[in-house]
Image (cartoon, rainbow, N blue to C red):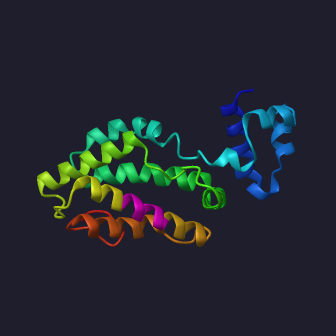
Amino acid sequence: MDRQQIQETALSLFKERGYSNVTVQDVCDACGISKPTFYSRFHSKDDIIVNLYDGVSERLGDQLGELIGTTSAWEQLLICYDTIADETEGAGEELMRRMLITNLREDHHSLDERPYLSRTMTSIIERGQASGEFDNPSDARQLREATDRMFTGYFCYWCISRGLLDWRVAFRKSLAAVLGVRGVGPGGARD
């Protein structure tokens, strides 16, 4: 069994039983492998969750048709951030909280920008500025970095609240304010 298969099996167990209720032995049993095999691929159970966001750029590629299908830079940016939010919520607040804790102990770069996604979102912001959809004239790359950090902040609040914060709506309102998007309603969608 390869590293990816072990990780997928472990993540499934974590979601089903809860991270703290699953041992390395449970993962080994579910995968039909020995502990030495597990430890030849992962340093620890935490090592399984530090790369939860690695596939986001690929999944955004799956959304490419939807991205291209709208001419609104605002809608395109929301598709990008919603893809990341879907990944976050799909993993669940417990796993994401654990990933944050692991990165606070030692930076595993779990929250580093993904180059393809960063370039795509910067281009969207530039198009939104050029079309007048975004009023903020600041450098698009700096705006994207700021909105990424803002997204991470709301994500952290979501983890701290144990999933109770409606972080998508809060983030969308803040995103609209930072970019200078007019006509965004209470739910974060454009009127």
In the image, taking residue 34 as reference, residue 190 lies left or right, namely left
- Taking the spot 40% from the left edge, 53% from the top edge, the residue there is 81
Decide if residue 150 is in sight here.
Answer: yes
For residue 85, above or below residue 44: below
Image: magenta residue range: 147-154
Name the residue nearer the viewer: 185 or 153. Answer: 153
The verdict on residue 96 being magenta is: no
For residue 33, above or below residue 63: above
Point out the image quarter for the N terminus.
Answer: top right
Image x and y of residue 186, in percent: 33, 73
Image x and y of residue 73, in percent: 23, 51
In the image, taking residue 187 as reference, residue 89 lies left or right, namely right
- Taking the spot 19% from the left edge, 64% from the top edge, the residue there is 136
Image x and y of residue 29, in percent: 86, 38
For residue 97, above or below residue 44: below
- Taking the spot 12% from the left edge, 52% from the top edge, the residue there is 131
In the image, taking residue 8 as reference, residue 22 lies left or right, namely right
